[in-house]
Amino acid sequence: MTAISYRNTKTTLPNWVPTLHNDQPRGIAYETDTHFVHFYGIDFGFWVISTGLTVTEKKNGTLIEWVKRVFGAEDIQQSNNRIGYTVEAVWRPGLYYEKELLDGLKISKTDQRSSEQALRLFIERLDELLLYIEPDTNGLKTYSHKTRELLILSCTEVENNWKQYMRIAGAIPINNRDFTTKDYVKLSALLYLPEFQVSLRPYTNIPSIRPFLGWNSSSPTQSLGWYSAYNKTKHDRNSHFAEATLDHCIQSIAANLVMYCVRFSPFPLVNASNTLSSLIKQLFVIDLFDCSSKSFYIPHIKLPNNIREDLWCGDTKNFVEPWEVSPLNL
């Protein structure tokens, strides 16, 4: 089965407020042997697809005709993913609840806790630096042994995450020795890294950060300014001490947040009640910027035998089939 995604422009559901499409402007739909199925979704934050807002109706005509008639569908696109399938270790909207995250991403709780400990360390150190350095235009250029230490630690963790993905994909280094950014840059599109955006919540004067935007294979190290700075100051502090700026520290920590979100989803960082989540919600806003709904995962709903034939909307969370996981291939 294949699915389509689109933008909702009207609401025709019986007994529902006629402005539902304003709050839930995204739609994903497919057809079963007997019914059309539609999920509502949002177009901000983490672009959540809601099985709690599932619309079904007995088939009559084509799927395209149905979504246009019922939802005023515009910008209709064919989904890239099969219904009910995920890619190992790559989170996309469509996965939300803890069990489906564990199953659909093949998450190890041990790996997750280890990543969270590293994040907590970086963010606590950044939080302490921000007590002494104001991140305005001048403060962002500040550098010291403390910022250099944080930049090296943070970028080393990014490299560790990249290497994990290479192992998951069973990749072989281009030079047959060690992985380099010539290998790692392949992850950019595969993991949708440029879509992730990080903002500093208390400092609205600082533009939002997209730490992987512009990463390219023609200059796989230099096209990541924060990572290039790390390489320079790590190998030659005397010549490149000034590269270890507060700005590059913040960008590298944003990169770590992105890598965590891809591997484990963003929801443990924003929904949990623990010290790490509190720190992140205090300092950061994470969201997806201009992402393509064609790449989202589509829940496979097993409709009950007594499913209604008329147009209705309800919660189908308990009818979602187990996710099938495809291997990650470079």
Image (cartoon, rainbow, N blue to C red):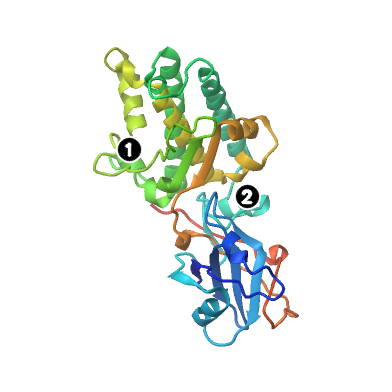
* Identity of the residue drawn at 36% across and 43% down: 213
Can you say whether 158 is above or below 150 in the image?
Answer: below
Q: Nearer the viewer, residue 93 or 171?
A: 93
* Identity of the residue drawn at 49% across and 33% down: 204
Label 2 environment density (alpha carbons within 10 Å; few <14, some 14–19, many ≥20): some
The image quarter in which residue 104 lies: bottom right
Can you say whether 171 is above or below 119 in the image?
Answer: below
Left or right of 47, for residue 205: left
Numbered mark located on residue 102 in the image: 2
* Identity of the residue drawn at 65% across and 76% down: 56
Label 1 environment density (alpha carbons within 10 Å; few <14, some 14–19, many ≥20): some
Numbered mark located on residue 181 in the image: 1
Instruction: Where is residue 162? Give x, y as percent.
Output: 43, 39
Instruction: Where is residue 160? Give x, y as percent.
Output: 45, 34
Q: How far separated are the C-alphas under marks 2 and 1?
A: 29 Å
Left or right of 204, for residue 32: right
Amino acid found under the numbered disc labelled 2? Leu
- Of all residues shown, which one is farthest toward the bottom? 61
Can you say whether 13 is above or below 193 in the image?
Answer: below
Instruction: Where is residue 246? Give x, y as percent.
Output: 42, 22
- Judged from the image, the secondary structure of the residue bearing numbered disc 2 is helix
- Judged from the image, the secondary structure of the residue bearing numbered disc 1 is helix
Q: Nearer the viewer, residue 72 or 317?
A: 72
